[in-house]
Amino acid sequence: MKKSVGILLLCLIFNGCASSPDDYMSMTPRSLCIAWYERLGGNIHAEPMGIAIDRRGIDCNPYMDAMKEAKRSRDAFYDGLKENLKTTPTKQIRCTTVGNITTCHEI
């Protein structure tokens, strides 16, 4: 019984993160094409976006320059985040909160 409840709970959680093509039917063609192109390469939302583009018969070619620029910008943002995770902090700080007052000092 516990296992069934756990599986049901996991399905509900993952289903809440998933999207369907219907979620993208009201987006403008330009916005949908850009969002789809940005997410190519492993994002779970790329496939349903692509299906919505196909169903609506949208030609994304007129938006190719904007799509490439948005993808470059998004990739640069995530590359920066990855780079930040590689850095090692040079100082350690310890903070203590008492009531409404927080005091921090280097260790």
Image (cartoon, grey):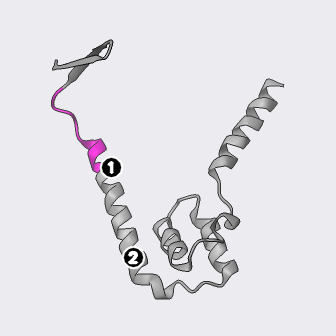
> Could you tell which of marks 2 and 1 lies nearer the N-terminus?
2
Q: Quadrant of residue 66?
A: bottom left
Q: Position of residue 14 (x, y in %)?
A: 66, 45
Name the residue located 51 percent from the left edge and 78 percent from the top edge: 30
Q: Residue at x 32, y 50 (%)?
A: 81
Q: Is residue 76 above or below residue 18?
A: below
Q: Which residue is mark 2?
A: 68
Q: Marks 2 and 1, how far apart in space?
A: 21 Å
Q: Label 1 near label 2: C-beta < 8 Å?
A: no
Mark 1 element type: helix
Relative image position of residue 84 (x, y in whole percent): 27, 45
Residue beneath disc 1? 82
Where does the magenta region start and end? 82-91
Q: Seen in the image, is 30 located left or right of residue 101?
A: right
Q: Is residue 18 above or below residue 22?
A: above
The residue shown at (66%, 63%) is: 23
- Given residues 49 and 1, the one toward you in this image is 49
Q: Nearer the viewer, residue 105 or 102?
A: 102
Q: Is residue 40 magenta?
A: no
Q: Which mark is residue 32?
A: none
